Image: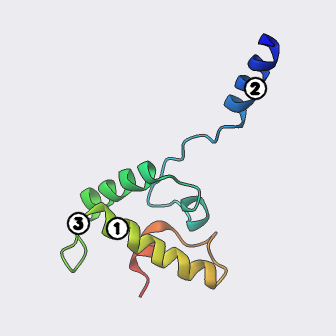
Amino acid sequence: MLVLLLVIVVGGLLSAQPAVAVTDSTTCTTWGSTNQTQERAYALLYVREHGPFPSGARDPASVVAAINNGCGEAYVNDVEDNVTVVQAITQP
């Protein structure tokens, strides 16, 4: 029983996804694998490095929404591997 428990725990640890460090060059494909904590951390970094949006928005939710919208467009056009999160934000 103990061996079975150990196998389950070790298997779970080995199959866990590694943390994704989101940067300006992260593609939409990789962005799709991030969790909310990673998205929020990047949104805060984006505002710190690039400043607020022209509308004045600087909250993480606005940044994440802009990336999701731009990446959604990239998926529709089948270019998600070529569009970065910064490009997704600036998509018209």
Q: Is residue 13 above or below residue 86?
A: above
Neighbours of disc 2 within 10 Å: few (<14), some (14-19), many (20+): few
Measured along the vertical axis of the image, is residue 21 above or below residue 4? below
- Residue 46 at what x, y percent from top left? 33, 60
Gap in angstroms between the C-alphas marked 2 and 1: 38 Å
- 35 vs 11: above or below: below
Mark on residue 8? 2
Residue linked to disc 3? 58
Residue linked to disc 1: 63
Helix, strand or loop under label 1: helix
Which x, y percent locates residue 76?
Answer: 62, 84
Q: Nearer the viewer, residue 80 or 7?
A: 7
Q: CA distance from mark 3 to mark 1?
A: 7 Å
The tag earlier along the polypeptide, 2 or 1, is 2
Q: Position of residue 92 (x, y in %)?
A: 41, 88
Q: Disc 1 marks which amino acid?
A: Val
Q: Is residue 89 left or right of residue 52?
A: right
Residue at 33 percent of width and 65 percent of height:
61
Residue sitting at the far bottom: 92
Which residue type carries mark 3? Arg
* Residue that extends furthest to the left in the rendered view of this protein: 56
